[in-house]
Image: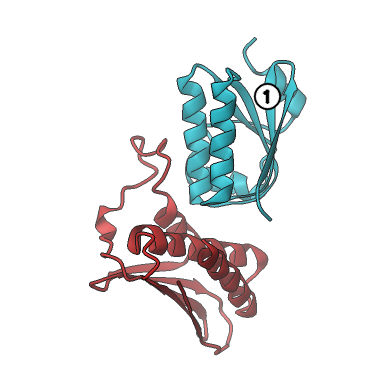
Amino acid sequence: MSMKASNRQVNGVTVVDMSGRITLGEGSVILRDTIRDLVGKGQKKILLNLGDVTYIDSSGIGELVSAFTAVRREGGELKLLNLTKKVHDLLQITKLYTVFDIKDDETAAIKSFAK
Amino acid sequence: MESVNHAEQTASEVAARAGLGEDEQYQVAMAVREAAVNAVLHGNAYDPGKRFVVAYETRVDALVITITDQGKGLDPESIPDPLQPENLMKGSGRGIFLIRAFMDEVKIRNTNPGTEITLIKHTGRNAANPKEEEAQ
């Protein structure tokens, strides 16, 4: 299953609903382009909903890290929502679980962004 | 990347046939994917004229997978630790780490030219079904 990403605005936060595989090649590129596009438009409060992401490899993890640093560099915030167990475990063994702000409730996640 | 996806899929199937559970099938498939990506990107440097070979061997108590490329070789000592603070926020460099995390044993050998990486997952069952395939 290839990766898909769609955006929606909720109270000033851009929620990016992602599905499929974030792997080297298409998946990573879609994520990179999506973040670049949002930051370019000045949308700097980004919530990545990974609930339907079935698989992520080291390239995908790297892309999440790059997205996080790119948004932060522009003074924004990027948070993760609805991790599957596999993605959760990957972030834990790579010690990135504490780096990212990870949420499991969308409403609470939206509220947690700085006004 | 088609060959990488194919290697990952085959690894998952071989792991299932070796009697590994769903989580372990995922781990083996991920390790093979990462090794295949390294072979294509860092080993063969995207050279379409170079191949990587994935060999599967189901032993009595283990699944042994060997991935070889035709690149310039890899020094395992030179691989940075992605958990170190200075590397934690890097956008790459986690492939070998994940392979080591997911497999029971990992051996990296410089074959001059090329790199051979052997991945071992203990299965604890009897079987014998060697399989080899090539990918470009």
At numbered mark 1, what does the secondary structure look like: helix, strand or loop?
strand
The residue sitting at 59% across, 34% down in the picture is A34
The x and y percentages for residue A43 are: 61, 20
Q: Quadrant of residue B43?
A: bottom left
Q: Is residue B67 above or below residue A11?
A: below
The x and y percentages for residue B8 are: 56, 66
Residue A92 shows in the view = no
The residue sitting at 56% across, 79% down in the picture is B124
Q: Is residue B124 left or right of residue A95?
A: right
Judging depth in this view, the residue of B43 and B25 nearest the camera is: B43
Q: Is residue B112 above or below residue A105?
A: below
The residue sitting at 60% across, 69% down in the picture is B9
Residue placed farthest to the top in the image? A115
Residue placed farthest to the front in the image? B49
User: Chain A colour?
Assistant: cyan
Q: Quadrant of residue A1?
A: bottom right
User: Chain B colour?
Assistant: red
Residue placed farthest to the left in the image? B112
Judging by the rendered image, the residue that carries numbered circle 1 is: A14
* Quarter of the image with the C terminus of chain A in it: top right
Amino acid on which the number 1 mark rests in the picture: Thr
Q: Is residue B110 above or below residue A83?
A: below
Judging depth in this view, the residue of A33 and A109 nearest the camera is: A33
The residue sitting at 66% across, 52% down in the picture is A2
- Specify the color scheme: by chain
